[in-house]
């Protein structure tokens, strides 16, 4: 039986080696980027003092976000507040049980956005609201780990509008290196990369883009 010369296999092995190298390179890039993302999340804080703005956008997903938005409204850092992603059939009282006095006093200045179900939807909802009231400066309130992706989506749909991040630290971030928190952060960082690379429409097949 005649053995096939080795040089017939070399192109195949060469392609495999290049593929493995590419995978390792991508994994290394992800790890380095994730480490930088962790540093950013651990050190980010809202500006002090908070600049005056035309409106506040609080993204739902955690009770602290709405409370922080209401606090900014009560401090007169902006005259209007949008609670984005409230969902259909919800009311202001569903989000403000611990802030009843502030919610009641400023109810006329608060808009509940019922359409958004994702960060992408939050950006569309904020854009419609900002254009309706002719707002030029917005304070964006969301969790610190969610802020990079939220700001990316907001900038894309609110060109020409100044955006001021006001990150909120949720309880989950108190133990940054616990396994559940690392899982949450790694998932969020991956979603951020998907949006950054413009792959959101493709990625929704494999990833839940909330």
Image (cartoon, rainbow, N blue to C red):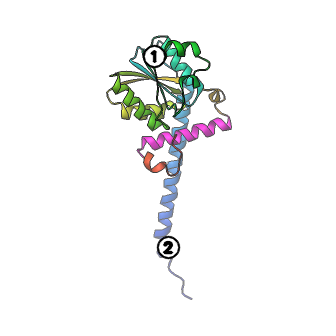
Mark 2 lies on a secondary structure that is: loop
Q: Tell which of 104 and 42 is nearer to you.
A: 104
Residue underneath mark 2: 9
Relative depth, front residue between 119 and 8: 119
The residue drawn where x is 62% and y is 37% is 182
Query: Residue 19 appears at what percent x and percent y?
Result: 49, 59
Q: Which span of residues is magenta-colored?
A: 178-198
Q: Earlier in the sequence, mark 1 or mark 2?
A: 2
Q: Secondary structure at mark 1?
A: helix
Label 1 crowd bin: few (<14), some (14–19), many (20+), radius 10 Å: few
Report the residue marked by disc 1: 108
Q: Is residue 190 visible?
A: yes
Q: Which mark is residue 160?
A: none
- The question of residue 195 being in magenta is answered with yes
Q: How many marks?
A: 2
The residue drawn where x is 31% and y is 27% is: 160
Q: Are marks 1 and 2 in contact (CB under 8 Å)?
A: no
| Percent of width and height locating residue 26 | 50, 49
Give the prevailing secondary structure in the magenta stretch: helix
Residue 85: percent from left, percent from top: 50, 32
Q: Residue at x 57, y 89 (%)?
A: 1
Give the alpha-carbon distance from disc 1 to disc 2, as whole Å.
73 Å
Q: Is disc 2 surrounded by few (<14), some (14 to 19) or many (20+) residues within 10 Å?
A: few
Name the one closer to the observer, 207 or 37: 207
Q: Is residue 169 visible?
A: no
Residue furthest front in the image: 89
Displayed quadrant of residue 108: top left
Of residues 88 and 47, the one drawn nearer to the viewer in this rendering: 88
Q: Taking 207 as reference, is 101 above or below it?
A: above
């Amino acid at each position: 039986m005649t053995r096939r010369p080795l040089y017939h296999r070399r192109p195949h092995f060469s392609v495999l080696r290049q593929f493995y190298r590419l995978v390792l390179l991508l994994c290394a890039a992800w790890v380095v980027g994730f480490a930088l993302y962790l540093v950013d999340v651990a050190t980010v804080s809202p500006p002090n003092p908070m600049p005056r703005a035309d409106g506040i956008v609080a993204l739902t997903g955690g009770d602290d976000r709405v409370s922080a938005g209401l606090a900014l409204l009560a401090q007169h850092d902006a005259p209007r507040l949008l609670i984005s992603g409230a969902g259909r059939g919800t009311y202001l009282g569903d989000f403000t049980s611990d802030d009843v006095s502030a919610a009641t006093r400023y109810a006329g200045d608060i808009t509940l956005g019922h359409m958004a179900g994702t960060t992408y939807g939050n950006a569309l909802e904020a854009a419609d609201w900002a254009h309706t009231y002719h707002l030029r400066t917005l304070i964006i309130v969301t969790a610190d780990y969610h802020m990079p992706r939220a700001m990316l989506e907001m900038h894309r749909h609110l060109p020409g509008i100044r955006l001021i991040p006001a990150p909120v630290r949720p309880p989950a971030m108190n133990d940054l290196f616990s396994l559940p928190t690392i899982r949450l952060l790694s998932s969020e960082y991956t979603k951020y990369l998907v949006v950054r690379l413009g792959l959101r429409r493709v990625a929704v097949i494999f990833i839940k883009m909330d």
